[in-house]
Image (tube, rainbow, N blue to C red):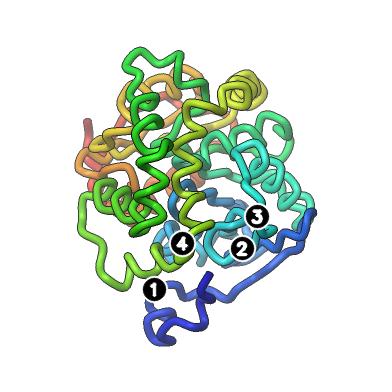
Amino acid sequence: MKALDRLDGKKVSEQYPFAPHYVDLSHGVRVHYVDEGPRSARHTIVFLHGNPTWSYLYRRIITTLCGEYSCIAPDYPGFGLSSAREGTTYGPADLSEFVEEFFEHLSLGPVTLMVHDWGGPIGLGFAGRRPELVNRLVISNTWAWPVDTEPTRSKTRFSRMFGGTLGHLMARQFNGIARIFLRVGTKRRLSKPEMKMYLDRFDDGPHRDMTANFPHHIAHARAYLAEVEQGLRAVADRPTLIVWGEGDIVSQTDDRERFERLFPNHVTVVFPEAKHFVQEDAPNGISVAIRRFLSGPDTSLTPTSTSLADGELVAR
């Protein structure tokens, strides 16, 4: 995998203006993470990405919030700038355990945990096992239960399409999973330097295979997803901000409403035009929502639903 410092220096500075940090975990894994903002801040936010992304997904949110909050964003083993043992295939349960180990090594907690895409099952699985380390949640375009319990079965169909032979062929031949997901999953068209930052993280066969492995796990990691769902009870009372791209064809309104029932102490902010990668479509709006959420009371929230244009609140 190409190292970040092998890319054009000016573009790196513009696209990803963070000093690198690393921690060595078990099984020979070296995890890269962003660590910006004052550690003395009242709130620490840990941002967990999904597939096929890395901490780069949160770059504009972090640069906006790090003046007042401690912002930490790891790359999972084999993603972004983190290493993985050669020949090892990690599933969501493995990555959730690495997140737990990451928290322990950095002595993190309690934190505000933001999850997206596969970061939902990975991060909420960890939160259910270690609820004392999470005091608030920010949930965006994800899920946390076996998909065969969903009425539309849209994720099951998605898993079969992109997690099978065709998906692996697309990934291997032209980095197709990452390329297609990022095109279809954003309202705005990502620039060439932005796409390069994503695609270069999956520049060889094994790493490209990983982008197709995760669609496969959507329908085939049922046992782990059932554990995640069961563990939600341990954090169901946490103040929760739900930020949702309404234009997503994978994580849909039914998923958002299910989270609203599971976390009654919530505020929902909907981005009507944003798609799956809402962090790319509405980073300013998410930053506004997080800042308002963290400046509110620690104990209880009045459930509300709001539409948020990118940076401007509008009553819904």
Distance from disc 4 to disc 2, alpha carbons, whole Å, reads 12 Å
**Front: mark 1 or 4:** 4
Picture coordinates of residue 61, whole percent (x, y) = 42, 58
**Front: mark 3 or 2:** 3
Distance from disc 1 to disc 4, alpha carbons, whole Å, reads 17 Å
The residue that appears at 70% across and 63% down in the rendered structure is 30
Q: Are marks 4 and 2 in contact (CB under 8 Å)?
A: no
Residue tagged 4: 202
Picture coordinates of residue 178, whole percent (x, y) = 37, 53
Query: Callout 3: few (<14), some (14-19), or many (20+) C-alpha neighbours within 10 Å?
Result: few
Q: What residue type is labelled 1?
A: Gln
The residue that appears at 51% across and 49% down in the rendered structure is 210
Residue tagged 3: 87
Q: Are marks 1 and 4 in contact (CB under 8 Å)?
A: no
Distance from disc 3 to disc 2, alpha carbons, whole Å, reads 15 Å
Q: Is residue 232 left or right of residue 150?
A: right
Secondary structure under the numbered disc 4 in the rendered image = helix
Say which mark, if any, is on residue 15: 1
Query: Callout 1: few (<14), some (14-19), or many (20+) C-alpha neighbours within 10 Å?
Result: some
Viewer-proximal residue among 83 and 233: 83
Distance from disc 2 to disc 1, alpha carbons, whole Å, reads 18 Å
Residue tagged 2: 82
Secondary structure under the numbered disc 1 in the rendered image = helix
Q: Which amino acid does label 3 sit on?
A: Gly
Secondary structure under the numbered disc 3 in the rendered image = loop
